[in-house]
Amino acid sequence: MNKSSSQVLKRITINPEQCGGRPCIRGMRIRVMDVLELLANGLTPLQILEELPDLEAEDITAALLFASRRLDHPVLAA
């Protein structure tokens, strides 16, 4: 992971006392999953920023990067 990726990922926080320990954006109660679901439902990043004014464009990038890192696991076959 390069330095800029690690800086972006610092926007993702996980607190067991908040949102059931699910990954959130910068300690807010906006979950990474919320951002991903809005994108999956066809909203553009600009529309998401209008819908969730506490977010910044870098937060959307961080959510996508976080999700891609979580999914990039090798699958071991038995």
Image: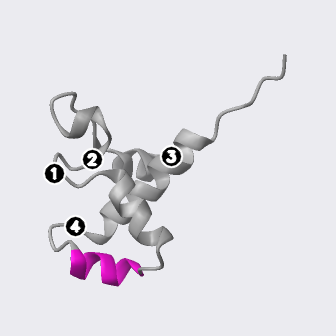
| Residue at disc 3, secondary structure | loop
Report the residue at 22% width, 67% height from top.
55
| Residue at disc 2, secondary structure | strand
Q: CA distance from mark 1 to mark 3?
A: 25 Å
2 or 4: tag closer to the N-terminus? 2
The residue indicated by pointer 3 is 2
**Percent x, y for residue 31?**
29, 51
Q: Which mark is residue 46?
A: none
Q: CA distance from mark 4 to mark 3?
A: 23 Å
Q: Give the residue type that dot 4 points to.
A: Leu
- Magenta-tinted stretch: 44-51
Proximity of marks 4 and 3: CB atoms separated by less than 8 Å: no
Q: CA distance from mark 4 to mark 1?
A: 9 Å
The residue indicated by pointer 1 is 28
Q: Give the residue type that dot 3 points to.
A: Asn
Proximity of marks 2 and 1: CB atoms separated by less than 8 Å: yes
Is 43 magenta? The answer is: no
Packing grade of label 3 (10 A; few <14, some 14-19, many >=20) is few
Report the residue at 40% width, 55% height from top.
63
The residue indicated by pointer 2 is 24
Proximity of marks 1 and 3: CB atoms separated by less than 8 Å: no
4 or 3: tag closer to the N-terminus? 3
Packing grade of label 4 (10 A; few <14, some 14-19, many >=20) is some
Q: CA distance from mark 3 to mark 2?
A: 22 Å
Proximity of marks 3 and 2: CB atoms separated by less than 8 Å: no
**Percent x, y for residue 43?**
41, 80
Report the residue at 24% width, 69% height from top.
56
